[in-house]
Image (tube, rainbow, N blue to C red):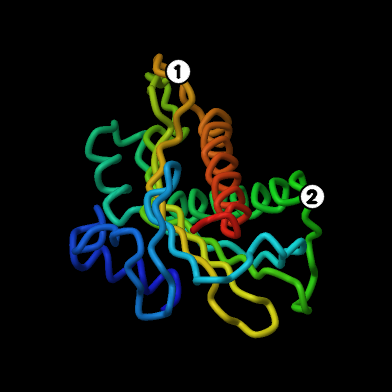
Amino acid sequence: MNLQTLFIVCVAATGGAACAAGPQAPGQVTGEGLVAVQSRQLDELYLRPNADLAAYRKVLIDPVRAEVSSDWQKNLNYSRNVSRWVGPDDVKRVAADAASSLESVIAQTYSARGYEIAAAPEPGVLRITASIADLYVYAPDRYSPWTVKTFTRDAGQATLLLEARDAVTGTLLARVMHRGIAREVTRVNTASDVTNRFWFDALFRRWTADCIAEFEAGRNRS
């Protein structure tokens, strides 16, 4: 099952909040041979038993896909003056910007941790496939003559998904699903496309670093 299919199943079952049965209990085995592992930082983490993800020091990063929440445009326009409505092109732009940002952050974060970015599958390469689902940006830029500034505490939220496979065999080694909020401080902040990108980048960096930490800790788990 790919990431998009997994998310669609969850949405169909619960309206997008979580999978119908909720996160699996630690130690429970999925149909793909992964085992649910408890994580302090990630909502759902599944690892293949005895797979040494820490042995991989090269990563091949697939293009990231992003999907905006299905009700984002309708909800946003309902609460705004018509001069500040967002349209289909804005939906595509927001999704494309988020996908590009996450793909860049994944490469930067892995490189900072000493991993080599591979250009093609080869032995010893971990293939990373990430995606963003249910993306919701609270206050995208759409200023009108009557609006000077927009303020918000959080930039938005998204469901972040990742699968890690052996690049040669295609064996699924890990899966992560996490619901994240783009927030760094508790006070109200001025919202713009620039600040939104900043806070979402911060969310993506934390999440990617948490994924790497869990993968590297795998060999030490009982």
Q: Residue 112: give x, y in percent of width and height.
A: 76, 44
Picture quadrant where residue 153 is located: top left
97 vs 74, nearest the viewer: 97
Lateral position of residue 4 relative to residue 130, left or right: left
Instruction: Judge the density around disc 1: few (<14), some (14-19), many (≥20) Cα neighbours within 10 Å.
Output: some
113 vs 192, nearest the viewer: 113
130 vs 123, nearest the viewer: 123
The three-letter code of the residue at mark 1 reads Asn
What kind of element bears circle 2? loop
Q: Residue at x 43, y 72 (%)?
A: 34
The three-letter code of the residue at mark 2 reads Gly
Q: Which residue is mark 2?
A: 114
Give residue 189's mark: 1
Q: Residue at x 71, y 53 (%)?
A: 107
The N terminus lies in quadrant: bottom left
Picture quadrant where residue 35 is located: bottom left
Give residue 36's mark: none
